[in-house]
Every structure is written in structure tokens, then in C-alpha cells.
Image: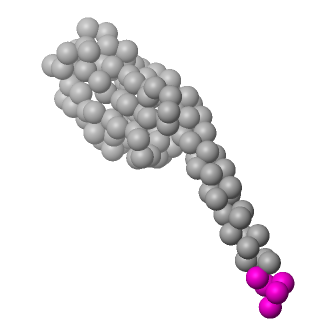
Amino acid sequence: MCVLCIIMILVGMMVPSVLKAYRRAKSFESEITGQQFTPAFATALATFYEDQREFPALKPEELAQLGVFDSSMLAFLRKPGVVYYPFSSKDKGDKLILRADQGKKPPYVIYKRDVVRE
């Protein structure tokens, strides 16, 4: 019984440290994911929209059906802290189209002017 009590005390002392390390690892993962996917996101949209003068606001699923996004890009857009704002040719160039939060650091942002020439 005494051994069991000692083990429980040790586990109780370790849990906060393990949770802190887990949260830090998740935060680091979202930072790496944002660094990896935001340039790919901008490149995919720029390639798709480079020859189009007029276009409707398309949701991520519609862009995936057209072959612009793959499944990993869709998974990135579904992550907490990542928001995609559909945009059309009629929106202004300073419209925010992607915001990817990365913890305490400033978020990654992409504007329409970054992917579409007007």
C-alpha cells in the first residue's frame, strides 16, 4: 500500500510538467504547419487565378474540387486558428483571405493582393 501511495504522489508531481510539454509541442506544431502551408497556399491560389479576370468567391472545398488544394491543404485550413475568407474578383486588394494564428507570435496573414494581380 505504501508503494502505491508513493507512485501516486510521483505521478501527481509529473502530470503538470507533462501537460506543459504537450501544450508547447502542439504550439510548435502549429507554428511549423503555418510556415509550411502559407507559402504553398499563396502559390496555389496565385497559379489558379493568374489568368482569370473575373471569378466568384470559392470555398476551400470548391477549390479542392478544381484541383487547387489537395487534402493536406484542406486539413491545414480546418485547423483551429486558421481562417480562410473566400474572395471574388470584385473584392478590394486589401481584403484578408487567410489568417493562421501561431500562438504568441503574430499570425500569418495573406491578402488578396498577395495572390491576384489586379
Residue 5 or residue 23, whichever sits in front = 5
* Quadrant containing the C terminus in the rendered view: top left
The picture places residue 90, in percent across and down from the top left corner, at 15, 19
Location of residue 106 with respect to 77 vertically, above or below: above
Location of residue 84 with respect to 91 vertically, above or below: below
Q: Is residue 38 visible?
A: yes
User: Which color scheme is applied?
Assistant: one colour
Q: Total marks drawn? A: 0
User: Which residue is the extreme one toward the right?
Assistant: 3
User: Which residue is the extreme one toward the front?
Assistant: 2
State the residue at coordinates (84%, 84%): 3
Residue 102 or residue 48, whichever sits in front = 102
The answer to whether 31 appears left or right of 51 in the picture is: right
The picture places residue 61, in percent across and down from the top left corner, at 33, 44
State the residue at coordinates (18%, 20%): 91
The answer to whether 107 appears left or right of 9 in the picture is: left
Q: Is residue 52 visible?
A: no
Query: For residue 88, what is the image quadrant?
Result: top left
Location of residue 45 with respect to 61 vertically, above or below: above
* Quadrant containing the N terminus in the rendered view: bottom right
Report the magenta residues as a range: 1-5
Query: For residue 12, what is the image quadrant?
Result: bottom right
The picture places residue 28, in percent across and down from the top left corner, at 60, 39
State the residue at coordinates (40%, 24%): 109
User: Which residue is the extreme one toward the left?
Assistant: 90
Examine the structure image and report whether residue 2 is included in the region drawn in magenta.
yes
